[in-house]
């Protein structure tokens, strides 16, 4: 017996008189506003559902009629359509319907303990919080290769649940680090791209860090590239502080054979500060800085970081105490080779019919930075006092390109061997 509520009135109904699908359909159509309350006990509802399936011979009904039966059961039992489908399937197999799930008395047992969370935090601290798959691989290797039983449970963790553990309270107490970004405007430099207009002397500058080792910082390379000629000066300093960086920048500006008219940097504090701004103001050099979401503003220096600095000096850690020797190598071998013996592509800008500018890189336009400087109209007018093309030609033709490359490689090998030998001896 089931009760129905209509305007606070309880009506008793003997539903066993509904023996055909047509009667069920008529019942459903005539009681659209009636909300049946379930009995409240799953055992009674399961027994009722089994009786209806058996009485109406559900397995022999057409698909449309089965839908009517399911609608009727959904109205009378309060179960969802998906749950009813599962229960009907079990009843058709002859199974006695009963509730399968019982809540555990002591609650759910935790698979991963507080010790596992602490071990995960320790592993992330050692490896710098790698991605979930990489961390999972590390823990599996710890068990299979190194027989570390502490990782037995963590080796079976899924990647998604690994991120859940990283949000656990025990993990955050060990690894929490908050860094709040403070947005403010620094009134130093003009936020725009350089506008050389075919003139040399507008340089873009960037810093390259030569790796960390055991928490100790390596030295820094300062890479400055001219926008028009790609004339490049690489220098090295121990730290990016004022005492180390400012003399290096002054020496770099003096090393260019042409007058420096513009100085462009990204928004790093090593360049955007009042000391550098004062130096550039004294030299009457325009100071610009990159704009947000405009990666091309300093793109030339970024590409040269990989093509020149990383290619010739690598990524390995070099201690700061060797900055003077690396700087001497750059001044005597790397910079002359790059500017007088290493050809570069120079783009030709072509504007199509729609007004869109496209860059073409042709083999005939490839030349060294020094050759590009000489090819500029009235190139001699851009040179500093004391620099002439006759003097620069002597540097350019003193040796062949292959000889310059050979001397560069020999000097680099000698430098790295010396650094390795003394670093190993110091360790």
Image (tube, rainbow, N blue to C red):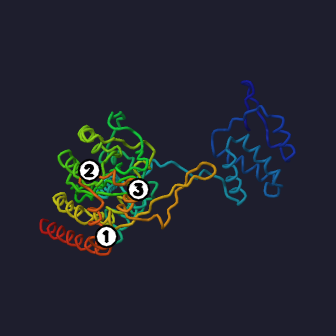
Give the mark nearer the N terminus: 3 vs 2: 2
Give the residue number, with chain letter if any, for mark 1. Answer: 147
Q: Quadrant of residue 147?
A: bottom left
**Does dot 3 land on a helix, a strand or a loop?**
loop
Q: Nearer the viewer, mark 2 or mark 1?
A: 2
Q: CA distance from mark 2 to mark 1?
A: 58 Å
Residue 152 in view of the camera: no
User: Which one is nearer the viewer's eye here, 347 or 25?
Assistant: 347
Give the residue number, with chain letter if any, for mark 3. Answer: 376
Instruction: Check disc 1: other Cα within 10 Å, few if <14, some if 14-19, many if 20+.
Output: few
Give the mark nearer the N terminus: 1 vs 3: 1
Give the residue number, with chain letter if any, for mark 2. Answer: 253
**Does dot 1 land on a helix, a strand or a loop?**
loop
Name above or below for residue 275 compared with residue 211: above
Q: Nearer the viewer, mark 1 or mark 3?
A: 3
**Does dot 2 land on a helix, a strand or a loop?**
helix
Q: Position of residue 21 (x, y in %)?
A: 85, 47
Looking at the image, which residue is at 19% across and 62% down? 328
């Amino acid at each position: 017996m089931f009760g129905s509520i209509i305007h606070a009135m309880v009506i008793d109904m003997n539903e066993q008189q509904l023996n055909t699908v047509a009667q069920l359909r008529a019942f459903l159509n005539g009681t659209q506003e009636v909300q049946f309350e379930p009995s409240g006990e799953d055992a009674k509802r399961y027994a009722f559902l089994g009786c209806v399936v058996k009485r109406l011979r559900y397995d022999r009904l057409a698909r449309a009629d089965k839908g009517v039966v399911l609608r009727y059961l959904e109205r009378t039992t309060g179960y969802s359509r998906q749950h009813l489908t599962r229960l009907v399937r079990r009843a058709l197999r002859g199974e006695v319907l009963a509730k399968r799930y019982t809540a555990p008395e002591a609650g759910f047992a935790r698979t991963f303990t507080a010790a596992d969370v602490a071990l995960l935090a320790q592993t992330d601290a050692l490896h710098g919080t790698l991605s979930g798959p990489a961390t999972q691989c590390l823990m599996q290797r710890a068990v299979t290769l190194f027989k570390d039983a502490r990782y037995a449970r963590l080796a079976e963790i899924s990647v998604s649940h690994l991120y859940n553990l990283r949000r656990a309270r025990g993990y955050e107490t060990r690894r929490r680090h908050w860094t709040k970004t403070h947005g403010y405007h620094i009134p130093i430099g003009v936020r725009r791209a350089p506008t050389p207009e075919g003139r040399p002397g507008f340089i873009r500058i960037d810093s390259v860090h030569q790796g960390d080792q055991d928490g100790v910082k390596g030295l820094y390379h300062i890479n400055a590239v001219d926008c028009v000629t790609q004339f490049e000066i690489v220098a090295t300093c121990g730290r990016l502080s004022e005492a180390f960086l400012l003399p290096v920048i002054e020496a770099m500006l003096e090393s260019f054979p042409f007058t420096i008219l513009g100085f462009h940097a990204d928004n790093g504090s090593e360049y955007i500060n009042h000391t550098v701004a004062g130096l550039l103001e004294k030299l009457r050099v325009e100071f610009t800085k990159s704009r947000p979401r405009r990666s091309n503003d300093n793109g030339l220096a970024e590409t040269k970081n990989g093509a020149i600095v990383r290619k010739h000096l690598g990524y390995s850690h070099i201690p700061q105490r060797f900055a003077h020797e690396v700087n001497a190598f750059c001044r005597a071998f790397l910079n002359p080779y790059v500017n007088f013996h290493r050809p570069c592509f120079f783009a030709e800008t072509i504007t199509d019919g729609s007004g869109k500018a496209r860059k073409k890189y042709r083999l005939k336009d490839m030349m060294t930075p020094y050759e590009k400087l000489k090819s500029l109209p009235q190139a001699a007018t851009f040179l500093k006092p004391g620099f002439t093309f006759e003097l620069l030609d002597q540097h350019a033709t003193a040796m062949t390109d292959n000889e310059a490359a050979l001397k560069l490689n020999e000097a680099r090998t000698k430098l790295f061997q010396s650094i390795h030998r003394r670093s190993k001896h110091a360790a």
